[in-house]
Image (tube, rainbow, N blue to C red):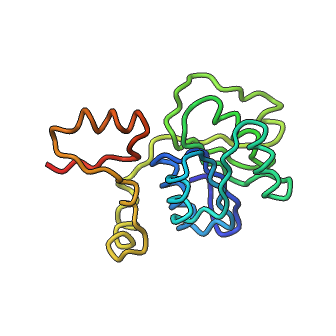
Amino acid sequence: MGGVNERTRVAVIGDGAVGLKAVLSAKRLGAEQIILMGRHKQRTDLGGEYGATDIVSARGDEGIAEVRELTGGDGVHVVLEAVGHMPAYEQAVGIVRAGGVISRVGVPQYEDAPVGFASLFGRNIRLAGGPAPARAYIEELLPDILDGTIDPGKVFDTTIGIDGVPAGYRDMADRKSLKVLIKP
């Protein structure tokens, strides 16, 4: 996850289920500061419960300026980009410090991204990401879940039966539900 440890300042872009899990993970890894960039109060409140130290609801240049201010002008060591859209990637480039990492944890919805000299190479910024090898972490994480140290289930805000699956997907697409739990 981008090399997060107790000395890192992290920004998570996106307050959906993936972004909230990124906040939870950064907290578990001991991040010094976790800035959640999101606009949905119920979700950013949950992000605070999961360990976000700061919430930034602004986007674009204003959001970049707020994150920079929160980090003394330096930007963050690690950006966990959980949206997957080009404006979120551009936001990530604007808030990562020189020598930092942009880790795309949201599935990119674009093929091409500007990775030229000025945007990444010249600032020694690393770009990482890919599917999470979830099974590799079960042994390490399951005890924390079972003993209540972490509660990833808080993102499930709607429970439906199998017949409600189409409506559940619609509710997630329409932002009425964060994550739907299907119980047969």
Above or below, comparing residue 89 to residue 40 in the picture: above
Within the image, what quadrant is residue 146 found in?
Answer: bottom left
Q: Is residue 70 left or right of residue 85?
A: right
**Which residue is outermost to the bottom?**
147
Above or below, comparing residue 88 to residue 21 in the picture: above
Q: Position of residue 28 (x, y in %)?
A: 53, 68
**Which residue is outermost to the right?**
73
What residue sits 77% from the left and 27% below the top? 116
Q: Position of residue 163 (x, y in %)?
A: 15, 38
Q: Position of residue 183 (x, y in %)?
A: 18, 51
Q: Position of residue 58 (x, y in %)?
A: 70, 43
Above or below, comparing residue 70 to residue 145 in the picture: above
Q: Is residue 103 left or right of residue 91?
A: left
Residue toward you, 111 or 40: 40
Within the image, what quadrant is residue 3 found in?
Answer: bottom right
What residue sits 65% from the left and 26% below the top? 113
Q: Is residue 165 left or right of residue 170?
A: left
* Numbered label tally: 0
Q: Is residue 32 left or right of residue 151?
A: right
Residue toward you, 81 or 40: 40
What residue sits 58% from the left and 31% below the top? 85
